[in-house]
């Protein structure tokens, strides 16, 4: 019975990865779908809101999808069948893949309002996965790259995407900002994203990949606000400051603390 449950878990992850990959082709416009940036009336375009990252930012999906597909294949190998870490991660990763596909479909069918609860739930699942990853240890370098590395990138990027998605939906719905300017709201949202990045760095004890993905997204927000059609210097500056802060906290947490010498221990030259 245990073996059959493990096989079911492995198959579910593999099937979910296939569905997510199909969804990514649809979302890119390569399989007859509308590219995400032009779907839903262009609400998620690079110049739609002050929080929208520049177009090249979405290239990060290439390593994320590649890592997820390779993980789905790797975890299907017999050696991973009864691995306790994969037992804990399997269905959570499958859920994230299905939610990813559901988000693309919601945008493709112009159900922009539905994309918000979907991406928020996706973010919650990725946080759950992140906590499992922190609570367990990889056995090999391959596992470190495919599991810890890929899922870290996935989480970091979805943090930025969630902020951009919610902002896009509010703007599309006619939200006026309670009288505050778009620049002010841009700075506020970027500050929240930066704080999330700092929190991930602290909880993750300086994990690199969440920081890389989150800072990649924020950096492209800065580029888009300085060079794109929707200019906002305050938002760009806030994004740059957030990147510097998140990177600094991550680096500090990764530097080992100096070992204190006991009174009887000689100091070496």
Image (cartoon, rainbow, N blue to C red):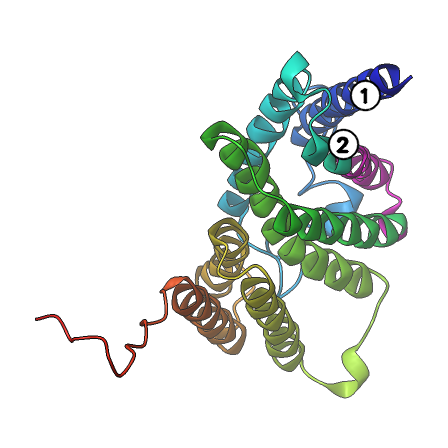
Residue 61 picture location, percent across and down:
58, 37
Residue toward you, 260 or 215: 260
Residue 163 in percent (x, y) is at 69, 61
If the image is split into quadrants, where does the N terminus sit?
top right
Taking the magenta stretch, the answer to whether it contains residue 266 is no
Quarter of the image where one finds residue 95: top right
Q: Residue at x 45, y 74 (%)?
A: 241
What percent of the width, then of the height, locates residue 94? Answer: 78, 32
User: Mark 1 highlights which residue?
Assistant: 6
Q: Residue at x 48, y 60 (%)?
A: 206
Looking at the picture, tell me which residue is in the foreground, 125 or 258.
258
| Residue 68 makes an appearance in the image | yes
Task: Give the vertical position of 219 relative to 267 (above or below).
Answer: above
Magenta range: 91-113
Q: Element under label 2? A: helix
Tag of residue 87: 2
């Amino acid at each position: 019975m245990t073996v059959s449950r493990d096989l079911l878990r492995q198959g579910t992850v593999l099937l979910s990865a296939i569905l997510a990959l199909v969804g990514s082709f649809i979302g890119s416009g390569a399989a007859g779908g509308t590219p995400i940036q032009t779907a839903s009336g262009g609400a998620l375009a690079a110049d739609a809101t002050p929080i929208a990252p520049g177009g090249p930012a979405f290239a990060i999906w290439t390593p994320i999808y590649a890592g997820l597909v390779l993980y789905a294949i790797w975890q299907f190998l017999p050696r991973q069948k009864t691995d306790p870490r994969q037992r804990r991660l399997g269905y959570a990763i499958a859920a994230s893949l299905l939610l990813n596909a559901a988000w693309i479909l919601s945008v493709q069918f112009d159900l922009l309002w539905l994309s918000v609860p979907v991406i928020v739930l996706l973010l919650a699942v990725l946080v759950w996965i992140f906590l499992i990853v922190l609570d367990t240890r990889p056995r090999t370098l391959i596992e470190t790259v495919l599991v810890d590395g890929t899922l870290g990138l996935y989480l970091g990027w979805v943090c930025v995407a969630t902020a951009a998605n919610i902002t896009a939906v509010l703007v599309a719905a006619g939200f006026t900002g309670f009288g505050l300017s778009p620049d002010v709201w841009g700075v506020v949202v970027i500050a929240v994203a930066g704080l999330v990045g700092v929190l991930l760095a602290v909880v993750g004890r300086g994990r690199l990949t969440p920081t890389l993905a989150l800072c990649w997204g924020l950096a492209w927000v800065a580029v888009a606000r300085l060079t794109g059609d929707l200019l906002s210097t305050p938002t760009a500056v806030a994004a740059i400051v957030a990147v510097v802060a998140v990177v600094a906290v991550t680096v500090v947490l990764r530097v080992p603390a100096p070992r204190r010498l006991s009174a009887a221990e000689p100091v070496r030259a």
